Amino acid sequence: MFAILLFGYSTLSYAQAPRVVVTLKPLHSLVAGLMMGVATPQLLLPDGASPHTYQLKPSTLKQLQQADLIIWVGPALELFMVKALHSVQPRLGLITVLDIPHLQTYPQRHGRQWHDHAGHDHGTVDPHVWLSTDNAQIFVNTLSAYLTKADPLHAKQYAENAKKLTKEIAALKTQLQTLLAPVHKQPFLVYHDGYQYFEKEFDLHPVGTMMVNPHLPLSANGLNVIKTLIKDHHVHCVFRETEFNDNMTQQLGSLSVKIAELDPLGTRFPPGPENYAKTLVQMGTTLRECLERKSN
Ligand SMILES: [Zn+2]
């Protein structure tokens, strides 16, 4: 009788493994690693969509309404979520990554040329926090504790997965440090200010961004500022990105710079536990290959 009751209980609980929805692919990857053997989390943002500009669809809203736990970065990145979150009440709650205690956050930089604006903090947080492996580790620790409490039946699995992830994240950090050390002094420009966490963790030397606001097109004046920046700082490498449809190649056509493409949202790799490391290694490799061309 007792055994049957136990069996019944565990079956019921297994069927109730939490339905977790995560907005961004790289974060979804970490969640997938943590939930391995328990359930597969759902990914909200489709490939090719920018979290900055995404418009909520009825199907996305439905996904959110059916979730037990929702994980998003926060209003500084995913404006489309703010309204949606008014109409959902996930059983196990909501995790706003930007609010995680001890997570390293930096203020959003301003202007095109960053060293001119050092110290100006307008109070807006830079939301691209997942590009720091230290933050990835803090995220995993927090989520592991959260899931253990919310779903104690799978506590052992969460603990084992968290341990494995911790090792993988440490190895990833070491790999990226080795990869990027030879080019850390090389100046470069990015398309939008989305890489601060990666740049700081790996001691890179960006001089500025093409776009001050990724929602507004580049003006003729802005383009002139960029061209001057490229000349003054001897920039030979500019990074466009998968997330935005720009015509940078055309605009910079007359300058002798190399243009490479960064993919901070991991669109080149399938969703799943391996996406996070693959995405960061790919970014590191792209930076290294472009920047080491003309080291002097
Ligand atoms: Zn961004």
Image: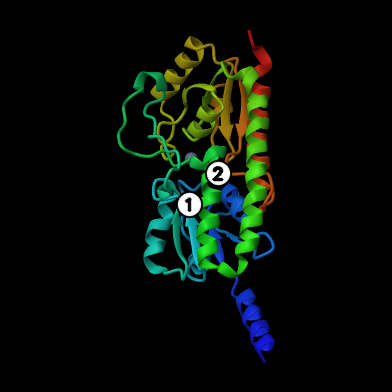
98 to 290, vertically: above or below: below
Callout 1: helix, strand or loop? Answer: loop
Callout 2: helix, strand or loop? Answer: helix
Using the numbered discs, state the Cα–Cα distance from disc 1 to disc 2 in whole angstroms.
Answer: 24 Å
Q: Report whether the residue tagged 1 is closer than 8 Å to ligand 1.
A: no
Task: Identify which residue, 232 or 177, lies in the foreground.
Answer: 177
Q: Decide if residue 36 is in sight here.
A: yes
Q: Residue at x 46, y 71 (%)?
A: 91
Q: Position of residue 223 (x, y in %)?
A: 45, 23
Q: Residue at x 64, y 65 (%)?
A: 39
Task: Identify which residue, 87 or 38, lies in the foreground.
Answer: 38
**Mark 1 touching mark 2, by CB under 8 A?**
no
Q: Residue at x 54, y 35 (%)?
A: 246
Say the numbered circle drawn on residue 165.
none
Q: Residue at x 60, y 14 (%)?
A: 256
Which numbered disc, 1 or 2, marks the residue closer to the eye? 2
Q: Decide if residue 113 is in sight here.
A: no
Amino acid under disc 1:
Tyr
Outermost front residue: 2
Please name the residue that numbered disc 1 is placed on.
Answer: 54
Task: Identify which residue, 176 or 3, lies in the foreground.
Answer: 3
Q: Quadrant of the N terminus?
A: bottom right
121 to 2, vertically: above or below: above
Q: Position of residue 19 (x, y in %)?
A: 56, 68
Drawn side of residue 73 relative to residue 261, left or right: left
Amino acid under disc 2:
Ala
Say the numbered circle drawn on residue 136.
2
Q: Position of residue 166 (x, y in %)?
A: 62, 45
